[in-house]
Image (cartoon, helix red, strand yellow):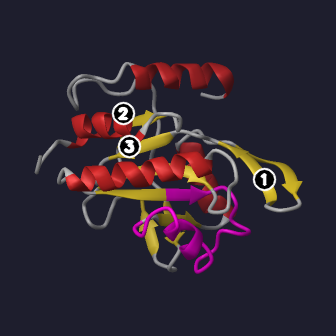
Amino acid sequence: MRGLLGATLLMGAVLAAPAQAGNAPLPFDVGGPFELTDQNGARRSQADPQGHGQLLFFGYATCPGICSAAMPMMADAVDRLADAGIPVTPVMITVDPERDRPGEMNAPLARYHPDFIGLTGSEAELQAAYDAYSVERELAYVDPEYGPVYTHGAFVYLLDAKGEVLSLFPPILSSDRVVELARKYLGSEGS
């Protein structure tokens, strides 16, 4: 599912989110297994090792564009869900593996949230994740201040602890709406 038609179908699926979790699967196939390396050099799959839900985004740690809107929204939603007793891990899979390397993503991601996980890998490993989530990336231009600027997928995927995609959100949603929707899928224990 690519291009404008795919984005329109995905947006419709988000806006028509079910009233209760689990009663309406996504009307398209998205997500799947991956094995990548986090910012500390540890291997990580789509499953959360602590059994938390996840908010997954494809971007890059120094992105001056949509990432700088999506990742703070994710961080706020993660904190608010934690306050409600629903632990969720924010995760970014890089589209800029030349700059997003283990040890180099720590500081940029920590500016958004101390628990942000940044994932990278070989071109083949990353391509498997891009394909599973229908994410395209392309070098748009080189900015004199920021360096390479990429076009890339912009949806935030809500995953359960096993790494199954429950829903996806456009990055323009408020954290209020993301929290509301995530609670429907992940439960509201502790609230």
Q: Amino acid at mark 1?
A: Val
Q: Is residue 36 visible?
A: no
Of badges 1 and 3, nearer the viewer stands 1
**Tags 1 and 3 touching, CB below 8 Å:** no
User: For mark 3, what is the residue?
Assistant: 158
Q: How would you rate the neighbour count of disc 2 (Cα within 10 Å): few for under 14, some for 14-19, many for 20 or more?
A: few
**Residue 44 marker:** none
Tell me how far mark 1 sits from mark 3, CA to CA. Answer: 25 Å
What element does badge 1 sit on? Answer: strand
Examine the residues drawn in magenta and state their main secondary structure: loop
Give the residues drawn in magenta, as a range: 92-115
Q: Is residue 103 visible?
A: yes
Tell me how far mark 2 sits from mark 3, CA to CA. Answer: 13 Å
Total marks placed: 3
User: For mark 1, what is the residue?
Assistant: 149
The residue closer to the viewer here, 139 or 45, is: 139
Badge 2 or badge 1: first in the primary sequence: 1
Q: How would you rate the neighbour count of disc 3 (Cα within 10 Å): few for under 14, some for 14-19, many for 20 or more?
A: many
Badge 1 or badge 3: first in the primary sequence: 1
User: Horizontal and vertical percent for residue 22?
Assistant: 22, 31
User: Horizontal and vertical percent for residue 180?
Assistant: 29, 35
| Residue 104 magenta-highlighted | yes
| Residue 85 magenta-highlighted | no
| Residue pictured at 34% horizontal, 24% vertical | 17
User: For mark 2, what is the residue?
Assistant: 177
Badge 2 or badge 3: first in the primary sequence: 3
The residue closer to the viewer here, 169 or 37, is: 169
**Tags 2 and 1 touching, CB below 8 Å:** no
Tell me how far mark 2 sits from mark 1, CA to CA. Answer: 29 Å
Q: Quadrant of residue 99?
A: bottom right
The quadrant in which the N terminus is found is top right
User: Horizontal and vertical percent for residue 38?
Assistant: 50, 71
